[in-house]
Image (tube, helix red, strand yellow):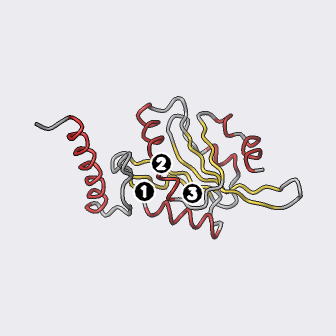
Amino acid sequence: MVSTSDLFVSLNVAHGMFSDVVGTVMDLPCCKSNSASGMAVCDECKLKFLELKAKRSFRFIVFKINEKVQQVVVDRLGQPGESYEDFTACLPADECRYAVFDFDFVTDENCQKSKIFFISWAPDTSRVRSKMLYASSKDRFKRELDGIQVELQATDPSEMSMDIVKARAL
């Protein structure tokens, strides 16, 4: 007789293998899936982040989870001339997202600096299932993006206002 815990482990293993097979069969550019959530990270996410970090090709990158293929993908790229207001305006009011923002600021000592923020956006109006999926995949996804300096979690725009960002950067 098979115990419930053995069956659960078997299903989780099968789910992880299925996610990897889906990425291979559909020629999706992804790496190994996240064992906790079964989520894969598209290679484009890592490449665009490296461009933001090294070349400053983008001001921000918004990522979303494509639930059909169980992977994190790039949703929007913010050009270098775009502002923090442009960034916040592109976040959907009722859907979760991950984002990175390259924040330029001047310190109290009058030094020009930059910090890369990782923002986990989970508005109160988003689906509970979506919030759970984003929460369970966040740490693994963040580890794929080497160079994050500040993390911010927000459920409404007031939790990621410019004042809060400036305070966290200093």
- Give the structural element (helix, strand or loop) at label 2: strand
Check the image and report above or below for 55 versus 160. Answer: below
Answer with the quarter of the image where residue 116 lies. bottom right
Q: 25 or 114, which lies in front? A: 114
Cα separation between marks 3 and 1: 17 Å
**Place of residue 154 in the rendered image (x, y in percent of width and height, measured from the top left):** 61, 38
* Outermost residue to the right: 109
**Place of residue 81 in the rendered image (x, y in percent of width and height, measured from the top left):** 70, 59
- Other residues around mark 3 within 10 Å, as few (<14) / some (14–19) / many (≥20): many
- Number of numbered callouts drawn: 3
Q: Which mark is residue 77?
A: 3
* Outermost residue to the bottom: 55
Cα separation between marks 1 and 2: 10 Å
Instruction: Give the residue at mark 1.
Output: 41
Image quadrant where one finds the N terminus: top left
Check the image and report above or below for 130 versus 102. Answer: above
Instruction: Give the residue at mark 2.
Output: 64
Answer with the quarter of the image where residue 161 lies. top right
* Outermost residue to the left: 1
The residue drawn where x is 62% and y is 65% is 53
Q: Given this view, does label 3 or label 1 mark the residue nearer the observer?
A: 1
- Other residues around mark 2 within 10 Å, as few (<14) / some (14–19) / many (≥20): some
Cα separation between marks 2 and 3: 12 Å
Q: Amino acid at mark 3?
A: Leu
Q: Earlier in the sequence, mark 1 or mark 2?
A: 1
Q: Are marks 2 and 3 in contact (CB under 8 Å)?
A: no
Residue 7 lies left or right of residue 38; in this view the side is left
Residue 116 lies left or right of residue 26; in this view the side is right
Q: Earlier in the sequence, mark 3 or mark 1?
A: 1
